[in-house]
Image (spheres, coloured by chain):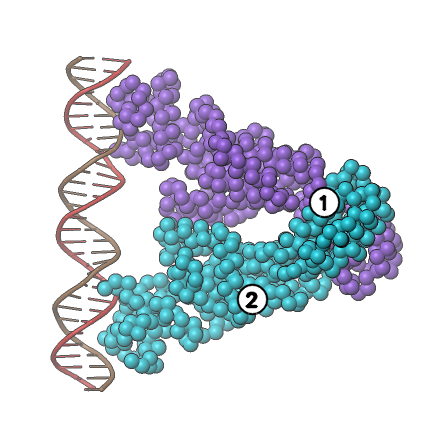
Chain colours: A purple, B cyan, C red, D brown
Amino acid sequence: MALNDRKIQILQAIINDYIATAEPVGSRTIAKKYNLGISSATIRNEMSDLEEMGFIIQPHASAGRIPSDLGYRLYVDRLMQKKELTPQEQQLLKSVATTNISQIDYLMEETAKVISILTNYTVLISEPVFTGAKLKQIRLLPLDSESIILMVATDGNYIKNHILKVSVVPEEKKLFEMGSCINNILKGCTVEDIDECIIALLKRELQEYSYILPMLLSAIQKTARGAESIQVHLSGTKNILAFPEFSDIQRAKSLFQTLEQKDVLITLLQEQKNDDVQIMIGSENSLQSIKDCSVITTTYKMGNGTRGTIGILGPTRMDYSQVVSVLNGMVKNIESVLQALVENKNDT
Amino acid sequence: MALNDRKIQILQAIINDYIATAEPVGSRTIAKKYNLGISSATIRNEMSDLEEMGFIIQPHASAGRIPSDLGYRLYVDRLMQKKELTPQEQQLLKSVATTNISQIDYLMEETAKVISILTNYTVLISEPVFTGAKLKQIRLLPLDSESIILMVATDGNYIKNHILKVSVVPEEKKLFEMGSCINNILKGCTVEDIDECIIALLKRELQEYSYILPMLLSAIQKTARGAESIQVHLSGTKNILAFPEFSDIQRAKSLFQTLEQKDVLITLLQEQKNDDVQIMIGSENSLQSIKDCSVITTTYKMGNGTRGTIGILGPTRMDYSQVVSVLNGMVKNIESVLQALVENKNDT
DNA sequence: GTTAGCACTCAATGATGTTGAGTGCTAATT
DNA sequence: AATTAGCACTCAACATCATTGAGTGCTAAC
């Protein structure tokens, strides 16, 4: 059986209508709404064929048809038209860039929020990850009469401060020198590089202050781990409740449970393989618990080669073209923000 | 009509039963389950009185009774018994202290999570707030060939780093001196204190590097604002779905919408006036949207006098005594953690 | 190949009856 | 005077049944 032009038109009509209404679409509806110049009976015949071919499904005998996962697949691969964002949408997109973004995690939070507002779906974003983070700068600074600050910066300008309580705070100049000295020893190392030998060296250099060494090392380790761990931001989970496919509270609850597990989210985002927009429809997802959802992912890149992933999760009956447009727009946008963040006057 | 002992016993039975089952409680149920030594008919008469007095309500003619807000009020004020936490619960409480808590916001996140697990309600926590934050330490550090780090610490050891891109990075010693100098000028100031005069002074001291001044000031301002802004952590919102009172998806959705507005949460937590545990039942809440929820709040104090608030939100049919116990236990716990955080080797 | 027409299916809706938990009242009992 | 047994009454919840209408598949005519 050939998938002729008319069948495609009908399939497209079914999908469009179903995305808009969430109601099974019948032959009469199509005949009336989309004037394809054929009668409902003919459409009926074609629909029967489309069902046989697996593109549409009849939820029960006397109902209209709804697209199957395969139908959506055909749609996103061949039928979907590029949607232009409205000026309002574009403006909202850009608002992320103009708010005072000072920290990457805040930027991600904001980005997730804006996308979820624009699409009404659930948004997952992973922060850019630095693997094998190298120590870039380590410094000691005075804080007050009983504590000093240890600042650790790693690759990708991931910076953390740690407060170390000490019985005696060295004099400012001395502290500066100690910091410099530690910095010279550890600069360029990864955490794994810090071996007995280096520790001994540090101990010798610190002289009478060597007792702070354990805290110092533990703080450095923490920072490195932080730089290497994947942070996932989630927004718009509540949107799920608005979709009729989740009006059953049980379903909503079980999806919420899935979304609460950070490792699951990470897995989900890591399914994203190439750099393009990737669409996983319903049963194509490897996770059992989202077998009736679709996930659209894409990556954004920072100047230094690190990448993060943005994912959007919604019912399979999703406005794919809208989501793809928003994603493309947003990636462009945050890439330029990140660029500015690295190139300009900004802070972490 | 007097609220005699027997009426109180019956009211208590009704409340206990309703908290446990969420079903209206009938006279026969009470007669059977709680052997008060009187017949259901007598209980019926007493219940009729209790209803007249406003402590219980009949949702419809042929149903049992449920406690009114007034009934709950009487309960929490006079009837509620202190609950001891089980060893398991205590252990979970303490687990917050033992996980490697390095940042206040992470501690709060963790605390909120544990409380929501223990109570199954929704938890709001506000971080301790520092008003009129004074600058405590300001330092400049080298980062790489094109950027320097500005570190700003305020009262309450709130520390932020900012990356400043510069065309020429001053030599390490020079940078250190510039930092020291800025620090000497600004130390102890609030942001408001920085006037024309001080700016001029800074400009003079920075000499050829004075062009970084605008970025510098803006970064300092940001930090101070951050120290003074209220962070609210939210956990266990999804728990709401488990309660029969929210099985109507519309209600759940509208509550979620309320919880999404940070300013609403802040208002909610600021209702907490004294330092004791405070219970607001149903219509006692000033917010219209949570008129059928109860909110229990309490404060925790840090050594330096700053305080934060913990709030728990659930249906009016809440296990008040359990929540109060958990709250009391947790406050004791995080106060000691915060103490340790300030006194010991830790980081921000 | 297309379409009109018709029989058939089935979810959704509404009407109707039944059940059971619960009440209030009254009269008898303590 | 307080308590209780008994009974009539109410009403949500549930089940049953008929009706409706959207939708299909098939057949015969165009």
Residue drawn at point x = 47 percent, y = 53 percent: B259
Pick the front one: A290 or A339: A339
> Which of the two residues, D28 or B69, is positioned nearer the viewer here?
B69
Q: How crowded is mark 1: few (under 14 residues within 10 Å), some or many (20 or more)?
A: few
Q: Where is residue A119 in the image (x, y as percent from the top left)?
A: 47, 37
Residue A155, image quadrant? top right
- Amino acid, disc 1: Pro
| Position above or below: A267 against B272 | above
- Amino acid residing under circle 2: Thr
- Give the residue drawn at x 32%, y 66%: B66
Image coordinates of residue B340 in percent, x first then y, are 68, 65
* Residue B271 image point, x, y percent: 50, 64
- Residue B214's disc is 1
Q: Is residue A235 visible in the rendered structure shown here?
A: yes
A109 over A70 or under it: above or below: below
Q: Name the residue under label 2.
A: B299
